[in-house]
Amino acid sequence: MSKKKDNPTENGTPAARRDGSGSGGTGRDGSGSGGTGVVSRRRLIGGAGAAGAAGLVLGAAGGAGGYAATRGDAPTPLTTVGSTQAMFHGKHQAGITTPLQARGHLVAFDLTPGAGRKEAAALMRRWSAVAQRLMAGEPADNGRVHDTGVSLDAGPSSLTVTFGFGRTFFTRTGLTDRRPAALDPLPAFSSDHLDAKRSEGDLWVQIGADDGLVAFHALRALQKEAGPTARVRWQMNGFNRTPGATDRPMTTRNLMGQVDGTNNPKPAESDFEKRIFVPSGDSSAYAWMAGGSYAVVRRIRMLLDDWEELTVKRQEQVIGRRKADGAPLSGGSEETEMDLDKAGPDGKLLIPDNAHARISSPEKNGGAAMLRRPFSYHDGISDDGTPDAGLLFVCWQADPFKGFIPVQRKLDRGDALSPFIRHEASGLFAVPGGAASGEYVGQRLLEA
């Protein structure tokens, strides 16, 4: 369960449900499994200050546990941001339904020449072990790779590490017969200006945390553990609003200043699992994906200079929602359902025909939905003086051919937002279900 006392998410979901349905006092992934790292850290500290902590995780990540044990002064509780911990083991991997974190890294690896199924299995075993330790706030040091101490003194800070496999991974490991049809290449879209060097990849890792050093620590540890088996293909760094930066829980904003994520599927909805996760019970060659999801990753550059020349009223017409609070132009508050048929006194639709919110809505796409969980990015100023900034778009669904693809096709045919964005990189990855206790991520694929 969460080690956080009270820190509701931007969607109003309590922190105790940081990942998964949150039923029955389980861990954040809904699995009911506990992190062994919490127990070991408490033993290490010997219970000092536990009463005052009121259930918060004590100690620190990245090697700080040993440091705290040798200090002369008594350890003090971490703040709520630092103490929040996501569970590694569970039905689903963390980092899918976990609320947006302040910092993130997306990185793709390619297996090196000569590396096959055996080497990939060993890598996933190492990566899973490191991720489990770091997510529990423990050092990355496993006796073979020295911990850098980058996040010394920090707690887990909601760290999540999520692993996925690209289409080419199955060819390189001789597992093409176990490659799901859902990993077929995405179609081309008119807004694509894709850089192949920053797209796809054999392996994909998503790292998120509420502290920048904790996130970097995980990135560095995983890169080192890759050793001679895999090399980085591309890496992208992102950010979001820091938890607690607003006076009440609020949906985040993107770099266009728009409230972004209002219409996301909610875990409390009856069909959420069906839309986002691959169901169990499949006895075919794809049974290893049970409890997993498919991630579509797009680097979407925002043409901010052009966007910022528009009046606020015009921006709202492009999106279909008020900029101030995210409410639909048809009226109400942010959570009010859009009235797509409502017209103004002049007879014109209040939410224009080509508004982004209208075209991407499930009502206009046969119920197609995906869980959007992006990071913003800013990679400096381009040679022409424009900001290289935008969205690291990550969306999750049980089948991209029923989620991302139909919606993007619809947007491609007339979205008012299209002139202000450019898709510059793309990837599709199969993200298996979470590892049970004693397993590593992907074990059911690689050792079946």
Image: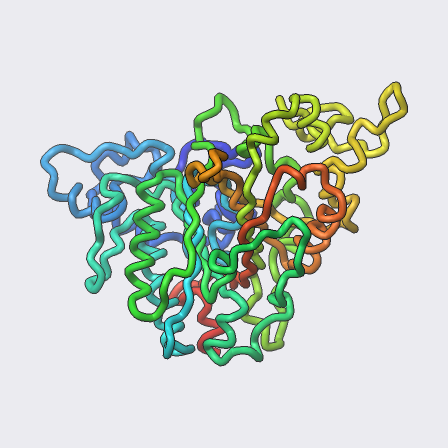
The answer to whether residue 293 is above or below residue 315 is below
Q: Is residue 312 left or right of residue 391?
A: right
The answer to whether residue 261 is above or below residue 230 is above
Determine the image quadrant of residue 261: top right
Residue placed furthest toward the right: 347
Residue placed furthest toward the top: 345
Is 376 or 279 nearer to us in this picture? 376
The answer to whether residue 440 is above or below residue 192 is below
Q: Quadrant of the N terminus?
A: top left
Kindly identify the residue that appears in the image at 65 percent across and 25 percent down. 310
The answer to whether residue 318 is above or below residue 441 is above
Kindly identify the residue that appears in the image at 58 percent across and 59 percent down. 294
Kindly identify the residue that appears in the image at 36 percent across and 56 percent down. 131
Is 197 or 28 nearer to us in this picture? 197
Kindly identify the residue that appears in the image at 36 percent across and 50 percent down. 135
Residue 370 in sight from this viewpoint: yes
Is 105 or 58 nearer to us in this picture? 105
Residue 33 in sight from this viewpoint: no
Determine the image quadrant of residue 308: top right
Indicate the position of residue 343 as horizontal and vertical percent values.
86, 26
Is 162 or 365 nearer to us in this picture? 365
Indicate the position of residue 129 as horizontal and vertical percent values.
33, 61
